[in-house]
Amino acid sequence: MGATRVKIAVCIKRVPVMDVRFRIGADGKSVDETGLKYDVNDFDLWAVEAALQLKEKTGAGEVAVFSLGPDAVQEQIRKALSMGADRGVQLKAASASADPLSIARALAAELEATQWDVIFFGKVAIDTADQSVGPMVAELLGLPCVSAISALEIANGRGTAKRELEGAQEIVEFPLPVVLTVDEGLNKERLPSLKGIMAAKKKPLEVKPAQLDAGTVSVAAMELPAERAAGRIIGEGAAAVPELVRLLQTEAKVL
Amino acid sequence: MATVFAFAEARGGELRKVALEAVTAARTLADETGGGEVHALLVGAPGIGGKAAALGAHGADVVHVCEHAGFEHANAEAGAALAAELLKRIGARAAVFPASASGRDLAPRVAAKLGVGVASDVVSVAAVGGAIHARHPSYTGKVITTLALTGTPAVIAIRPNVFTPRESARAGRVETVAPAVDPAASKVKVRETKAGSRAKLDLSEAPVIVSGGRGLKSAENFKLVEDLAAAFGNAAVGATRAVTDDGWRPHSDQIGQTGRVVSPELYVAVGISGAIQHLAGMRTSRTIVAINKDREAPIFKIADYGIVGDVFDIVPALTEAVRAARAHR
């Protein structure tokens, strides 16, 4: 890398904004999309930010954004371009597969043509709750992978990252090229500026067909979780503490 | 009869609880599909083989043990190569990994090597016809998705703290295996694992979680939450995104849509209003207690027991009462 141009890919996903009550579609296997709003997956925004910061620190290079899905994903690619990414690629498919390997294969088929220094993903897609595509792309391309990073240093063709484990932290060293998946806490994404939004309209956005196979994972059913019983206020102030302790002991049996 | 594989995660020379959960889930699946064998894989630094007996006690017929200095820390490259080779050799119908920080690295790599998909963060699993069905929360817990896995093996990563470890004595016959690739040659190297204090329970394993929000007003006041957690004796401390964004607590303590998703037996929300982003991380807790000054706070809509009022009065009183209750037990 050094003084040369750094080449960075970021893979992003279009996901529904989650602050709604979802409805299940008539087929019982999908979410009813009526009235949903969409945005870039939270973790993928931090991946875009990480890519932009790496390019800015290196001084020169390219950040390319990839997203698989129908034409609607162009909206999310444009958002990444308005944040500062240089170009976008839509891997066109009617919908994403439920099989992360199918998606990983389609992305790897596109990504392998270029010698990337870093390929960024978000840690997890908040709609499907899947966190496999990044590590799978690494495996398919024969690249090292560090998942769920919350701190990152890259210099002279090598990097160091921090990962949160359950009750512990790992400090990890790796060579470039590498696949990194980004956790919360690595950075805070920038908001697109008005200038950025105008510039994004002129940036290249290429559309290619996704090579999506049928895979071995499909959605059998979707359902809404059982509702919790309605909440109950048992009292006010410290005076309610003895009643709470009694309920925890005799009713909930957790004390 | 189907052979089912389980990855037994270890850290620092000790089995993690999720290792027993994985073996338990594998045992259940093997029994459901005609009573096949459960093969566990245990990798670690020399000496880790001494932990194999616990896996047999929880239903492993065979424990494949790979001891190598290169497995002292998590090593997804060499671990995945070994697991994939073993899975091919034993002809497993299904493979259970933990959806832990380490397991989430491993399961997708193994699946990609074997040319099959993977189901992440699974909370229940069953054999249905020729397929393995895996249920997992999606859309930040607002939708439950059932995935049908038709590949062989069906690779699933189970959510920690959901599959309760169950004893089911089996032979647990130890078979030594060599690494499939040199663990010392992995490109990614863990330089250091900074363990939290041994006494500190992790959020994913704690039966009780006491969590604090902006209502605590400052980082220093988190002492109230820590004291209450200490009074329970088996509690971990969590926080809302607002609090971790403000730097009062580390990001690793954040419970919510973009943080940790937990389902303890008891969740105590202190000074937490109950933003959707937070509820996504804790709404499946068995019992929820909320303490908040605002009677209209959304947290009270899902709390089994709510107390309205000043957290600075109520929490110290609750800490005392819990301490007394446990002393008299």
Image (cartoon, rainbow, N blue to C red):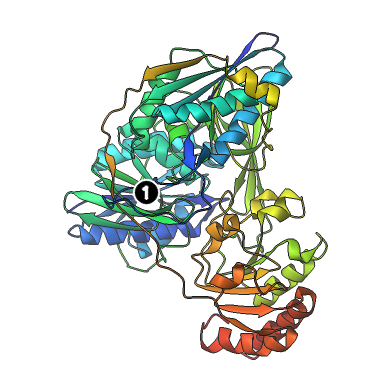
| Residue A35: image location, x then y, percent | 44, 46
Is A249 situated left or right of B222 in this image?
left
| Residue B184: image location, x then y, percent | 53, 30
Depicted A9 relative to depicted B99: above or below:
above
The image quadrant where one finds the C terminus of chain B is: bottom right
Can you name the residue that lies furthest to the top here?
A4
Task: Report in which chain the residue with disc 1 lies.
Answer: A
- Give A90 or B105, whichever is nearer the viewer: A90
Q: Could you say whether the residue bearing mark 1 is in a helix, strand or loop?
A: loop
- Mark 1: few, some, or many residues within 10 Å (few <14, many ≥20)? some
Name which residue lies at 71% across and 68% down: B271
Is A189 situated left or right of A138 in this image?
right
Residue that numbered label 1 is attached to: A31
Depicted B168 relative to depicted A110: above or below:
below
Name the amino acid, label 1. Answer: Val
Depicted A215 relative to depicted B166: above or below:
above
